[in-house]
Amino acid sequence: MTVMIIQAFFLTALAVGIGVLVGVLVKQWFGRRTIGRERLTEVMAAAEAAEAEAIDGAGLAERPATPSVEVVTSVMDAAVGPEVPSAEPAVPEPLIGPAAEVSAGLDRIAAADRVGERPPALPVARTGGADDLRRIRGIGPQNATRLNALGIYHFDQIATWTPAEMRWVGAYLAFPGRIEREDWIGQATVLAAGDRTEAAG
């Protein structure tokens, strides 16, 4: 009986020791790579602040709408710390949440810059609020939101786009040639004058 109690004690102690060791290893390998939603929000805010400081220090007049990939990466590295070396090959983790939006937006801008010229933007909508860009046939809720994010709020802005600006916006929205096919310029010109289009009803 005494021997069984001693064996049970040793087996329990061994199991607890192995559990602690595995827990420490798992935390060391994976714990520092995981960023919760709140931490990711803090990292994005810090990236925007770092970008603003860098721009202010360089004396630039205009700040981009999103922080650069380099700033986000450097701030995330500072927040997470160095990676623990692993014997397994590194597999890039997919971006989620705000970081994914920043990355996707930068990719769309880079693709658009290769084919056209970015149209002039407004910092905010004029007095009276933004026009409902969805009244233009071909602009749905998602494209209207993306246009607003670019500083395009009014029909008269779209009505004055040049061919190079149409190509840029088409590439940014991932619909090359759609602006021309659906005549967004003509529709916007009519709507800016106060008339209605087929899409407006």
Image (cartoon, rainbow, N blue to C red):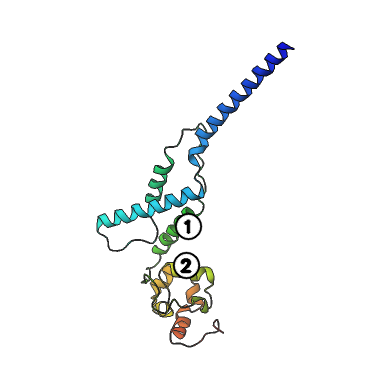
Instruction: Answer left or right for 119 relative to 41.
Output: left
Residue to which mark 2 is pinned = 146
Identity of the residue drawn at 49% across and 50% down: 38
Identity of the residue drawn at 42% across and 58% down: 106
The kind of secondary structure element at disc 2 is helix
Instruction: Answer left or right for 183 relative to 4.
Output: left
Q: Earlier in the sequence, mark 1 or mark 2?
A: 1
Identity of the residue drawn at 48% across and 66% down: 173
User: How far apart, in angstroms, are the residues tagged by discs 1 and 2?
Assistant: 12 Å
**Dot 2 amino acid type:** Arg
The quarter in which the C terminus is drawn is bottom right
Circle 1 crowding by C-alpha within 10 Å: few under 14, some 14–19, many from 20: few
Circle 2 crowding by C-alpha within 10 Å: few under 14, some 14–19, many from 20: some
- Percent across and percent down for residue 76 are 42, 46
Instruction: Answer left or right for 81 relative to 178.
Output: left
- Percent across and percent down for residue 77 are 41, 43
Residue to which mark 1 is pinned = 101
44 vs 139, nearest the viewer: 44
The kind of secondary structure element at disc 1 is helix
**Dot 1 amino acid type:** Glu
- Percent across and percent down for residue 174 are 49, 65
Position above or below: 49 against 169 = above
